[in-house]
Image (cartoon, rainbow, N blue to C red):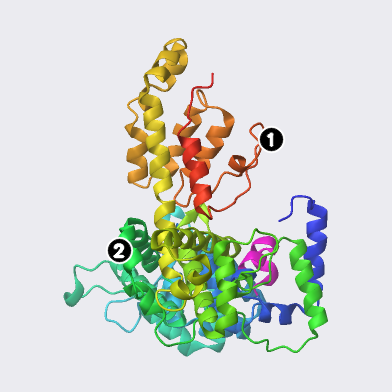
């Protein structure tokens, strides 16, 4: 959200958006990711009843399934409660239509966190809670903990379903029910919950793969292979790797594209609403719309030139390379973080383009091809942009190792020790870093978050510019410190992001790391 907007202006813009009669048409057109961004600004309660049914599953997929990049995502039922609360207020028919669209398995996983259901027809079962469709339903809290707000939200939802969708409710409660028997005497209720949760996860990953999305597991595997591959082997590759091949088998590639609007409205009205979104710092452009190899705001790279030449020779090949860019952007979003958070769509596309250009320059240098021939020789067939990306990503991941090695050399240097002896209190603060292997070990183990306090300690002996550079370079996805391309003594430190995009950037980084000196 733009910093210049005060709270009053933000509230006014949100009111204008929510009061617009074109809001349903806008939500029908926007990608799910953009709707999720909008919900973060407006609050779930403001838009929960306006999300079109056909967008609901995709939006909730973003909202409720959470994990750090590269880790297995897990459903968080607690995040579903505000949605249920808003739908309850809209009435029985409304809440039933939404839950039926999401399916009984998903609803059961969310409900089973908070309630237990028992079939009352079983021998020896006595009613102790609320009966719905032949099931005795009770909250899961222990007797001394009381009943929290979640139970009352679910109880109202159960009453709505019982009134208008009893068959669906029976399906949900059947999935939530657990009775110990001879056949499963060693299985706990917790195990049963884990089983239906795992089944939902597997079904979700299968649907995502079939639709052309990249799962976190596959994204992490692809990036690990790219990071650890021998560059010479990548240079010789003439086909997609197995993971990429699976995603480029014949089918329609779908990556966060907006569906066709079902509500008729004028484009002028929609454009005005999208401009309102822009005032809130939200882009209404699907990730595919972020692709461009003629970016006026950025210097034209070697890859930009090659892609332009390829487009002039073959529109089909150019489109294939764009599809690869979208795939790689989704890999970054699902598989790696940027400065401690997940990649945004815009940053993922920029990072892929920069990384591919870095690898493309390396390819040309190593193969000895003339630049004017490179676009056809290197981009006209498999593995297309996958090869330069893998090379670029491998080069990027040498940066944290190089930075850690430079710090280790600096800490072991006799001149550093000599200077530190003059200031014992600083030497004592840095004592645990002095062996020098601390940084290398943490980088090798990918424990980048653990490096942050160590870098702050180094601020006792290194200047601010060097510390900023180290903060940007010691990261799962290192970025280029803009300070390295500025005058030697800038008035202020530029902390804005710019991705490493060519071999010259690598040379500047290498020079910076080779000149670490004590500053105190």
| Mark drawn on residue 257 | none
**What x and y, as percent, mark residue 313?**
56, 82
| Mark drawn on residue 233 | 2
**Is tag 2's residue or tag 1's residue first in the polypeptide sequence?**
2
Q: Is residue 468 left or right of residue 404?
A: right
Label 2 element class? helix
Quick one: label 2, few (<14), some, or many (20+) residues within 10 Å? few
Residue at the outermost left position: 182
Given residues 212 and 248, the one toward you in this image is 248
Please indicate, yes or no, whether residue 120 appears anywhere in the rendered image: yes
Image point 35% across, 76% down: which residue? 239
Q: Is residue 479 left or right of residue 46?
A: left
**What x and y, as percent, mark residue 53?**
60, 83
Given residues 307 and 366, the one toward you in this image is 366
Given residues 422 and 373, the one toward you in this image is 373
Image point 78% across, 67% down: which residue? 276
Q: Quadrant of residue 2?
A: bottom right
Q: Quadrant of residue 366?
A: bottom left
| Quadrant in which the C terminus appears | top right
Q: Which residue is mark 1?
A: 492
Q: Which residues are magenta?
A: 36-48
Label 1 element class? loop
Given residues 77 and 221, the one toward you in this image is 221
Q: Main secondary structure of the magenta part?
A: helix
| Quadrant in which the N terminus appears | bottom right
Distance Cα–Cα, label 2 vs label 1: 43 Å
Residue 255 drawn in magenta = no
């Amino acid at each position: 959200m733009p910093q210049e907007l005060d709270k009053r202006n933000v509230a006014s813009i949100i009111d204008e958006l929510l009061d617009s009669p074109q809001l349903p048409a806008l939500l029908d057109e926007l990608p799910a990711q953009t709707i999720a961004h909008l919900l973060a600004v407006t609050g779930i309660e403001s838009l929960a009843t306006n999300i079109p049914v056909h967008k609901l599953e995709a939006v909730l997929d973003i909202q409720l399934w959470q994990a750090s990049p590269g880790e297995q995502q897990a459903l968080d039922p607690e995040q579903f409660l505000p949605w249920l609360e808003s739908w309850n207020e809209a009435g029985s028919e409304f809440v039933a239509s939404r839950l039926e669209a999401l399916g009984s398995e998903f609803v059961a996983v969310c409900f089973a966190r908070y309630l237990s259901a028992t079939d009352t027809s079983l021998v020896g079962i006595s009613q102790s809670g609320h009966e719905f469709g032949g099931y005795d339903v009770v909250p899961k809290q222990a007797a001394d903990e009381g009943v929290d707000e979640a139970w009352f939200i679910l109880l109202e939802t159960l009453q709505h379903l019982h009134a208008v969708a009893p068959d669906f409710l029976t399906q949900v409660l059947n999935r939530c029910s657990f009775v110990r028997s001879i056949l499963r005497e060693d299985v706990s209720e917790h195990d049963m919950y884990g089983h239906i949760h795992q089944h939902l996860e597997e079904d979700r990953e299968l649907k995502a793969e079939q639709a052309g999305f990249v799962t976190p597991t596959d994204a992490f595997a692809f990036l690990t292979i790219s990071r650890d591959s021998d560059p010479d082997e990548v240079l010789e590759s003439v086909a997609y790797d197995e993971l990429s091949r699976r995603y480029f088998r014949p089918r329609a590639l779908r990556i966060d594209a907006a569906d066709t609007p079902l509500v008729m409205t004028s484009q002028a009205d929609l454009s005005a609403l999208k401009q309102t979104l822009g005032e809130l710092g939200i882009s209404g452009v699907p990730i595919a719309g972020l692709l461009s190899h003629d970016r006026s705001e950025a210097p034209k790279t070697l890859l930009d030139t090659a892609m332009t030449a390829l487009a002039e020779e073959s529109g089909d090949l150019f489109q294939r390379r764009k599809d690869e860019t979208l795939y790689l952007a989704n890999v970054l979003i699902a598989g790696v973080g940027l400065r401690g958070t997940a990649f945004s769509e815009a940053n993922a596309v920029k990072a892929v383009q920069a990384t591919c250009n870095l690898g493309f320059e390396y390819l040309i240098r190593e193969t000895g091809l003339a630049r004017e021939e490179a676009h056809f020789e290197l981009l006209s067939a498999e593995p297309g942009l996958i090869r330069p990306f893998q090379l670029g990503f491998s080069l990027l991941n040498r940066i944290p190792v190089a930075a850690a090695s430079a710090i280790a050399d600096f800490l072991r240097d006799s001149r550093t020790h000599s200077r530190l002896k003059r200031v014992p209190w600083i030497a004592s603060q840095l004592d645990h870093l002095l062996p020098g292997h601390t940084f290398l070990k943490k980088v090798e183990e990918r424990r980048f978050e653990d490096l942050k306090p160590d870098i702050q300690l180094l601020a006792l002996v290194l200047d601010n510019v060097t510390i900023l550079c180290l903060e940007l370079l010691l990261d799962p996805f290192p970025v280029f410190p803009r300070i390295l391309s500025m005058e030697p003594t800038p008035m202020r430190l530029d902390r804005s992001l710019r991705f490493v995009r060519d071999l010259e950037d690598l040379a500047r980084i290498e020079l910076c790391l080779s000149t670490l000196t004590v500053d105190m």
